[in-house]
Amino acid sequence: MTVTDLVSYEDALAAYDPVMGLEVHVELGTKTKMFCGCSTTLGADANSQTCPTCLGLPGSLPVVNATGVESAVKIGLALNCTIAEWCRFARKNYFYPDMPKNFQTSQYDEPIAFDGYLDVQLEDGEIFRVNIERAHMEEDTGKSTHIGGATGRIHGARHSLLDYNRAGIPLIEIVTKPIEGAGERAPEVAKAYVAELRELIKALGVSEARMEQGQMRCDVNLSLRPQGTEKFGTRSETKNVNSLRSVERAARYEIQRHAAVLSSGGTIIQETRHFHEDDGSTTSGRVKEEAEDYRYFPEPDLVPVAPSREWVEELRATLPELPRVRRNRLREEWGISAHDMQSILNAGAVDLITATVDAGADSASARKWWMGELARRANEDGVELAALPITPGQVARITALVSDGSLNDKLARQTIEGVLAGEGDPDTVVEKRGLKVVSDEGALGTAVDEAIAANAAIADKIRGGKVAAAGALVGAVMKATRGQADAARVRELILEKLGVEG
């Protein structure tokens, strides 16, 4: 099945109803691994952060990371889940080279959190409730690097390298109940859910949830059923999708692919699939195992986890203002529409604007620069707004220079350009580039006199009552001062010198 084999999205939705299930893995920001004391710091030499426990060597015994359990409870509470009074770890048995023990320590039938929900806001303001089946604790696998071949995957590779630094890093897996009723908006719901979940995880402070670094990954399960029927179809699972846009694209592609297979009389294979960023397609991975294939059984080397009700309530009291509540509050404080707030959210600018306001800028100016010039630069560079080499404090300083008349918008853009180029903070850039607004009345007066003398015909029109023609003279003065004059003051001087009422 190739991209050209797909049916149109509209035809797919006319015949079939999509049902989704989203499994999101969140890598916790603990200092040590889930069941041993090895460091979780990124960027260390391969296999330098390992020990007998995370390598699964005989005689080694695991110990549960208390911060990992605390983070799991916080996530469960924020997702409106019930927190288990007693739960156990289990061994999920399978052989892959990136799992040195040949089993993953996870939770099976006794998760730490279950039966919750997360309300997400779609782009038109509609609220869609996604019900949560469970959130459970487990550990990450190692990292395989396949050498040779055209795709970077194991097929066609000459050999593979294994780095077990990541093996044992704490994960929380959050699994939704079947998401029904989204219809044509299913891909949008998937993207909105993962976006809201990412904001929630970041607000809790349990992970940076940076998808591009693998700290948060989504498996997109999707099936189709004929319109008007209730029985679920056979599902596919697109693994390890690592951006919001890709979550949406993967769901949309699978809807079209499933519909093409079913419409031609084919059968959907229950399998895992790989997502391809270049064209938004998916390809077959391996036949999907069922739970019984993993031969789960209780982990004999770990005692059960039994969070006391008092401790759970203490943690509940520490939860921060949750993202959707915070956004609604900020929207009212900033006096903007729901559509504008959604645009800010989509751009990843909520925290940046808030931090800029906290640094002294007014909210309108902060929004203007982050959603205007800086968003344009981020788009040009193909990076997230937060990845630009400029801080909210620096943006706040630029807004202050504009407010006190030291810079106009054009000069402010040049200042931003200098900061992004690594030339220093805003004041340093202004000084080095000589960007301050020309405020000396004598110098401005001379420039205005020269513009009037050089454009006598325009000056006569203005004297004759065509005040709008003053724009041409303002432009001439701005050109002469390299854009460093205050345009409003220049216009005032032109009209004064020509004896015309503003």
Image (cartoon, rainbow, N blue to C red):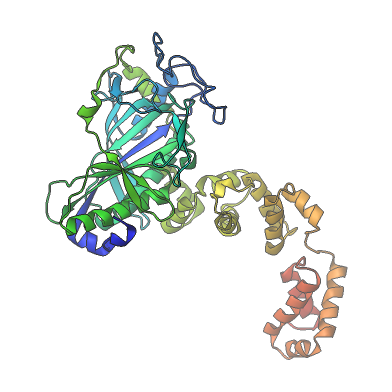
Is 65 on the left or on the right of 394, as rendered?
A: left
Which residue does the image show at 38% across and 56% down from the upper left? 123
**Is residue 132 in sight in this rendering?**
yes
The image quadrant that residue 495 belongs to is: bottom right
Considering depth in this image, is 284 or 71 the residue closer to the camera?
284
- Residue 251, x across and y down, in percent: 32, 51
Look at the picture and state if 252 lies above or below 442: above
Which residue does the image show at 73% across and 59% down from the upper left? 407
- Residue 189, x across and y down, in percent: 32, 50
- Residue 84, x across and y down, in percent: 28, 23
Considering depth in this image, is 177 or 251 the residue closer to the camera?
251
Is 369 on the left or on the right of 280, as rendered?
A: right
Is 39 on the left or on the right of 64, as rendered?
A: right
**Is residue 502 in sight in this rendering?**
no
- Residue 492, x across and y down, in percent: 75, 74
Most extreme residue toward the top is 59
